Image (cartoon, helix red, strand yellow):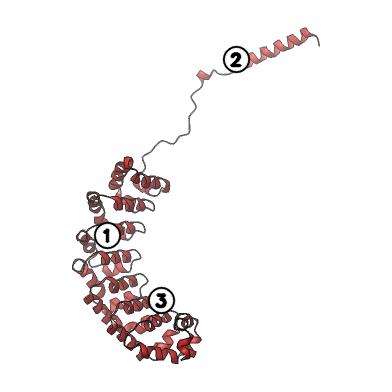
């Protein structure tokens, strides 16, 4: 092909390209590209409370002096809604812990009227417990007042039982005694609470934190049930707590009950059970007036106790081979 022919071919290609470009719409004639950006809608405090990343930023803001005031103000205004959410509950708890006395009072005014809703929430109960820890006990009486007439139901609730425990730790008998009367003034009710999977912790708490007169009253009502309770999954913990916090006279009374037991309620039979072995372990670990009689019964039952993996681990190994060799 000659140079001329080649040139004409080149010109023809350029001409076709120019025609093609001319047929295209001008950029200015095209509508603007629509970016797919979701409108910025305002999020509710409940939505934010379920947003882990957002709540973590709020926690950081409360530690930053330049952002603390704004973050705290927002949490104060959204306290109840946040308290009932998974991650928002942590934010409110931290805000309460870091709050000034005036800010804590603001939280109290906003949240305490909703104490019943908070204690039933898997997240809100932690916020209510935090308030109980930091507020003056006189400020907490309103919580007990809202529970008046419902103490047994609250004690049987998975989260309500925790709130009652915190109240018992931080309030006086004069302040919440009317609630304790509902729980502990009826033997049948108290015995049932000792066997309940949640309420038993409330009963244990009375032996740890109750006034001497209240503990003595509960001790007398539960003493007739110690053999039955000793082999129960939850009530056995109550018997151990009774032994732990009783004086030597009370420990001797419990020991007398075990020494008098017969058949399925005998000390030896109870010692060979899963939960009873822990109770008998506690019984032989106390220096009460009946300790020699208890140890003599345990020593005599050595062959029987060897057959149970529970008594072997919790009693025989605890006492040691030398004890049975004498």
Q: Nearer the viewer, residue 107 or 298?
A: 298
Going 31% across and 86% down the picture, which residue do you hit? Answer: 252
Under tag 3, what secondary structure?
loop
Single out the residue that lies furthest toward the top.
Answer: 4
Among the two numbered marks 1 and 3 on one chain, the one whose residue lies closer to the N terminus: 1
Mark 2: give few (<14), some (14-19) or many (20+) Cα within 10 Å.
few
Q: Is residue 264 visible?
A: no
C-alpha distance separating marks 2 and 1: 79 Å
Is 112 placed above or below 161 here?
Answer: above
Q: Which residue is mark 1?
A: 132
Residue 316 as seen in the image, left or right of residue 287: right
Mark 3: give few (<14), some (14-19) or many (20+) Cα within 10 Å.
some
Residue 22: give its label.
2
Going 37% across and 71% down the picture, which residue do you hit? Answer: 197
Is 149 placed above or below 84 here?
Answer: below
Q: Nearer the viewer, residue 217 or 34?
A: 217
Under tag 2, what secondary structure?
helix
Going 39% across and 79% down the picture, which residue do you hit? Answer: 232
C-alpha distance separating marks 2 and 3: 89 Å
Q: Residue 84, position in %: x, y?
A: 34, 54
Under tag 1, what secondary structure?
helix
Which mark's residue is nearer the viewer, 1 or 3? 1
Mark 1: give few (<14), some (14-19) or many (20+) Cα within 10 Å.
many
Q: Which residue is mark 3?
A: 233
Among the two numbered marks 2 and 3 on one chain, the one whose residue lies closer to the N terminus: 2
Q: Is residue 210 visible?
A: yes
Q: Residue 143, position in %: x, y?
A: 24, 61
Is 175 placed above or below 27 here?
Answer: below
């Amino acid at each position: 092909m000659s140079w001329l022919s080649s040139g004409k071919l080149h010109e023809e290609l350029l001409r076709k390209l120019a025609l093609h470009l001319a047929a295209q719409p001008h950029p200015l004639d095209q509508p603007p590209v629509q970016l797919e950006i979701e409108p910025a809608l305002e999020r509710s405090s409940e939505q934010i409370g379920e947003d882990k990343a957002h709540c973590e930023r709020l926690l950081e803001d409360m530690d930053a002096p330049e952002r603390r005031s704004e973050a705290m103000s927002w949490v104060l205004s959204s306290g109840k809604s946040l308290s009932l959410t998974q991650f928002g509950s942590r934010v409110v708890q931290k805000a309460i812990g870091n709050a000034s006395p005036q800010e804590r009072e603001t939280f109290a005014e906003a949240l305490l009227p909703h104490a019943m809703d908070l204690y039933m929430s898997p997240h809100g109960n932690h916020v209510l417990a935090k308030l109980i820890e930091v507020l003056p006990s006189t400020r907490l009486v309103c919580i007990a007042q809202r529970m008046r007439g419902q103490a047994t139901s609250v004690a049987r609730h998975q989260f309500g039982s925790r709130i009652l425990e915190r109240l018992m730790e931080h309030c006086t008998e004069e302040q919440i005694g009317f609630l304790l009367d509902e729980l502990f003034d009826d033997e049948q009710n108290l015995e049932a609470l000792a066997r309940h999977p949640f309420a038993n912790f409330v009963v244990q708490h009375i032996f740890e934190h109750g006034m001497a007169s209240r503990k003595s009253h509960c001790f007398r009502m539960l003493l007739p049930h110690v053999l039955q309770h000793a082999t129960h999954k939850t009530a056995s913990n109550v018997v151990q707590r009774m032994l732990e916090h009783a004086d030597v006279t009370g420990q001797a009374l419990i020991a007398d009950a075990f020494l008098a037991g017969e058949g399925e309620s005998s000390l030896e039979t109870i010692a060979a059970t899963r939960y009873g072995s822990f109770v008998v372990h506690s019984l032989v670990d106390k220096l009460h007036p009946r300790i020699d009689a208890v140890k003599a019964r345990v020593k005599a039952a050595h062959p029987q106790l060897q057959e149970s993996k529970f008594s072997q681990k919790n009693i025989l190994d605890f006492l040691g081979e030398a004890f049975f060799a004498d």
